Every structure is written in C-alpha cells, then in structure tokens.
Image (cartoon, rainbow, N blue to C red):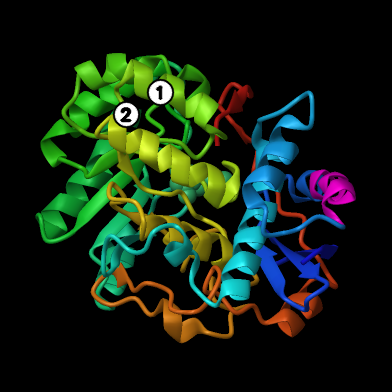
Amino acid sequence: MKITKLTLYRVPPRWMFLKIETDEGITGWGEPVIEGRARTVEAAVNELAEYLVGQDPTRINDLWQVMYRGGFYRGGAILMSAIAGIDQALWDIKGKALGVPVYELLGGRVRDKMKMYSWVGGDRPADVIEGILTLRDIGIHTFKLNGTEELGIVDTATAVDAAIARIAQIREAFGNTIEFGIDFHGRVAAPMAKVLLRELEPFRPLFVEEPVLAEQAEYYPRLAEHTSIPLAAGERMYSRFEFKHVFARGGIAIVQPDLSHAGGITECVKIAAMAEAYDVAFAPHCPLGPVALAACLQVDFVSHNAVLQEQSMGIHYNKGAELFDYVINREDFQIKDGYFPPLPKPGLGVIVDEERVIAASQNPPDWRNPVWRHPDGSVAEW
Ligand SMILES: O=C(O)[C@H](O)[C@@H](O)[C@@H](O)[C@H](O)CO
Ligand SMILES: [Mg+2]
C-alpha cells in the first residue's frame, strides 16, 4: 500500500482534520492542530507530506521515527502536533486495512468502558452550579472548571477568596455526589499555587491541573510536598523526552498528554506505559474534535492506568460546531452513566462526515485565544 495524498481541512470551531489517501482506496483521518496556531501546523504537515507521499502507511513506527528524527530540529508544540495528526491517520488506515479497531492492534482492551468528564463554567468560571445540574441530569458526575480568572504572581486575599468561594459553593450544593478537577490553566504562578492549594485542601478536588506552567515543572515535587491534592499536568508537554523529567522528579499524580499535540497514538501509548511504571495515572487532554477523542479512547482502552477522559461536548470553545457535528457514527460514542464504550469500528472508530467537513472548510475559522491583561496593563496568563 502507498500513501497518495494528504488533505487538510480547517473547520469550526477551531479544529483541523487531515485525510490521508492511499493507492488501495483506504483513507485515514487525523486531527493535527494547535488551538490558535492551526495554519502553522498546516504548514508543518504539508512539509512532512513531501516525504510521506509514496511511503507504505502501515510502517507507522518507521514513519514516526523519520518524522521525528529526520528533522534536525525536533519536538515542540507545532511539529509534535503535525506528527500527532499524521500518526492518528496512519493508525486509522492500518486498522481499516486489517478490519479491527486500533486497540486490537495494541493488544486488546484492559477495560469494558472509559470514565469521562465534562467542562463547566467557561473561561471565567461562572454558573458552575447550573452547568453541573444540567450535565448531572444526563448521567455525568465528573467535571472540570477553571480555578481562577487572571491572577498576579502574588495576589490578594480577595482574589484567593473568590477562587475558593466558587469551589465551596460546589461542595455545598452537591457534597460528594459529584467530583471535579480544578484547572489552574497556567494562570497561577508558583507563589500563589502554594496558597491556593492550601485553601483548596478541605474541598478535596479530584485533581488540580497545571498547578504552574509547564515551563515551571520543577515546582511540581515541591508543591506536592505541601498538598494531598493530586496534581495533574501534560497538555503542554509534547514527547516522552519531556515527560521523563516529570516522572523522574515526581510530584505529578496524573499525566495529561494531548493525543493531537504529543506525537499521536504511537507516542502517547509509550507515555502511558512510562507513567504506569511510576504509579502515575493517565488522563488524556482533549478539548478538541471527534478524531482526537477517538484516538484518545484507543489508547485509554489499552492503558491500565487510564483513569479519566476529557472531551469537548459543550465546552466554552465550541462556538460554530459541536463535538459530533462532523461524525456519522455518533451512536458509537454514546455516553452511559459517565462512561464511553469501546469504539467498535475498524481504525480509530470514527466515521467522518467528509461532505460536512469539506463544506465547513470553505470558510475556515482562525481561532485565537484571548490576550488577557492585568489591571496594570501587563500581560496575564489566559
Ligand atoms: O484542560 C483543558 O482542556 C485545556 O486547559 C484547554 O482549556 C486549553 O488547552 C485550550 O484548549 C487552549 O486553547
Ligand atoms: Mg487544562
């Protein structure tokens, strides 16, 4: 089999789909994208395509190594997202060619269903109680919300109280009948992380995510010394070579690589295995589209330490399209009591509505994250 063509489609809300065609009529889909830098990833995929056309798509490991090691400069968000989406499409092709879901190619399922969670509260976390009530009615009991709005490197007791009050409200309203993670979203600097974690202890959140920015990863073990709250991170780390330092230093209880940013299925299966060796849980980051989610689920179902799957249904970013708008086999993703079933179809298990994707790509979005500023006018982490 030979790769004949790679085609990219940027579509609302902020996603990019890749279609890889072959000379045997089998096509594979991937989702190579960095939210806010779609056109940069598009250029990276097109550069890699120069090598890929004419290659055998079933030699996924060799193609991955060439895409990663064949460039002198490697790693980082853009290149690893380009490789990720291509890798997903190659696994999709291989599974379709052999007539099995990817998890069968990876040794078969270790579980019968995969626990998921939903976002509530939006960018500036508000109306979280209402959001939880709505989602709980459809059987979802695990949530995630942003922990704060803009926060200074050192900030006031008022700002801390506002963050804590929101969490106290949730526990007051629901007790322990629901669970939630709190995403600091990189908005919290090391000095304030210690303060917030201490104040959050009594509310026992499931985890605190990105307690500090990924570039401050050396704080993870120090922060972990001060709190019993499981710390989570990983959406802004892009390969085993970054995660290995986190595992060696300790402090992180849950790693959250993104299947569309961290080199795809080939890389994230290895990250999950490394995590297991360190007794660290695996919870793929996925605020993106259905192809990325399908790729996550393929790895979840073969990873003993997979604990939670993020998905973007109703997420505050999905303006202009919702998670399953471009999917034909939506019934295969049916959530029951807060769990996803294993996807039954060959490959990634998602059947893309190509017509709808092509139509939506005619007027591609150019989503950018907002640039926030502190009251003094300096840039604030979003
Ligand atoms: O946990 C999450 O989903 C992420 O922090 C998410 O909010 C960001 O990755 C966002 O997609 C960046 O544009
Ligand atoms: Mg996050």
Q: CA distance from mark 2 to mark 1?
A: 7 Å
Give the quarter of the image for residue 256: top left
Taking the image as shown, residue 366 lies to the left or right of residue 317, namely right
Of residues 382 and 114, the one drawn nearer to the viewer in this rendering: 114
Residue at left offset 44%, top offset 19%:
245
Q: Within 8 Å of ligand 2, the CB of disc 2?
A: no
Give the quarter of the image for residue 107: bottom left
Image position of 61 with respect to 136: above or below: above
The residue that disc 2 covers is 252
Q: Within 8 Å of ligand 2, the CB of disc 1?
A: no
Image position of 270 with respect to 303: above or below: above
The residue that disc 1 covers is 246
Dominant SS of magenta comes to helix
2 and 1 marks in contact (CB < 8 Å) = yes
Give the quarter of the image for residue 147: top left
Is residue 180 magenta-colored?
Answer: no
Image position of 245 with respect to 114: above or below: above
Residue at left offset 77%, top offset 55%:
366
Residue at left offset 41%, top offset 14%:
218
The amino acid at mark 1 is Val
The amino acid at mark 2 is Ile
**Residue 8's x, y, as percent?**
80, 62
**Residue 222's x, y, as percent?**
29, 13
Label 2 packing within 10 angstroms: few (<14), some (14-19), many (20+):
many
Residue 137 appears in the picture as rendered: yes
Looking at the rendering, the stretch of residues picked out in magenta corresponds to: 43-53
